[in-house]
């Protein structure tokens, strides 16, 4: 296990999730027509923990769930990332109110690509919820509608965030010492 510092414990996370869920309910109540549902799209793998908590907290607001899986490879010589879709959506989004749920907004390149990709499919609305907005490495503007926590920088694990697919199931969000991660 790398050296880690707890940034946000389970209680702080639960309080933020409840606040975000209240904001989502307030934004969508009265917008949805009878029979309509929000389509919540989770970005795999990291968003599954946050998405489960968030959707349970929105209560009886009608929500349908789908997932997309993306991978980005950044060329070291440019600021552009190549985004590869590993799993596409199964549901149609045209004319629907879409809520993208992501674990972290970092450089913003993958989210920027995803927003452009989804906008081409003509949703009625598109909103973004992230557990963590890490602004220090942001390379492109991405509109974030619901943000759990904001910080400048740091290597994070826990609550869905991972290093080499490890540490996702930690109950809090931790900053890890990158030296201890690399040498592990």
Image (cartoon, helix red, strand yellow):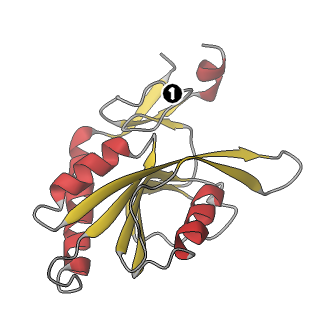
Where is residue 92? Give x, y as percent: 41, 67
In the rendered image, the vertical position of residue 30 relative to residue 132, given as above or below: below
In the displayed structure image, the side of residue 9 where residue 5 appears, left or right: right
Residue found farthest to the left: 60
Q: Name the residue under label 1.
A: 165
Residue found farthest to the top: 184
Where is residue 113? Give x, y as percent: 63, 63
Residue at position x 23%, y 85% in the image: 31
Using a 10 Å C-alpha cutoff, classify the residue at mark 1 as few (fewer than 14 neighbours), some (14 to 19) or many (20 or more): few
Q: Which part of the image, by quadrant, shows the C terminus? A: top right
Residue at position x 51%, y 19% in the image: 2
Depth check, front residue: 88 or 103: 88
In the displayed structure image, the side of residue 136 where residue 49 appears, left or right: left
Residue at position x 10%, y 64% in the image: 60
Depth check, front residue: 153 or 77: 77
Image-quadrant location for residue 37:
bottom left
Q: How many marks?
A: 1
In the displayed structure image, the side of residue 25 where residue 82 appears, left or right: right
Where is residue 11? Give x, y as percent: 21, 43
Image-quadrant location for residue 49:
top left
Residue found farthest to the right: 77
Q: What element carries label 1?
A: loop
In the rendered image, the vertical position of residue 51 relative to residue 145, given as above or below: above
Where is residue 169? Give x, y as percent: 35, 29
Residue at position x 43%, y 76% in the image: 94
């Amino acid at each position: 296990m790398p050296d880690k510092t707890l940034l946000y414990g389970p209680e702080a996370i639960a309080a933020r999730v409840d606040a975000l869920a209240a904001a989502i309910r307030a934004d969508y109540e009265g917008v949805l027509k009878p029979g309509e549902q929000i389509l919540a799209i989770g970005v795999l793998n990291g968003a599954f923990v946050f998405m489960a908590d968030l959707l349970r907290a929105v209560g009886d607001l009608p929500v349908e769930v789908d997932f997309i899986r993306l991978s980005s490879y950044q060329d070291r010589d440019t600021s552009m990332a190549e985004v590869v879709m590993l799993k596409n959506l199964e549901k149609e989004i045209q004319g629907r109110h879409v809520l993208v749920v992501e674990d972290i907004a970092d450089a913003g390149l993958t989210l920027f690509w995803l927003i452009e990709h989804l906008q081409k499919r003509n949703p009625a609305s598109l909103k973004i919820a992230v557990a963590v907005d890490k602004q220090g490495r942001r390379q492109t503007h991405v509109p974030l509608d619901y943000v759990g926590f904001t910080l400048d920088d740091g290597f994070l694990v826990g609550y869905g965030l991972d290093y080499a697919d490890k540490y996702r199931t930690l109950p809090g969000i931790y900053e890890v010492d990158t030296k201890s991660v690399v040498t592990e």
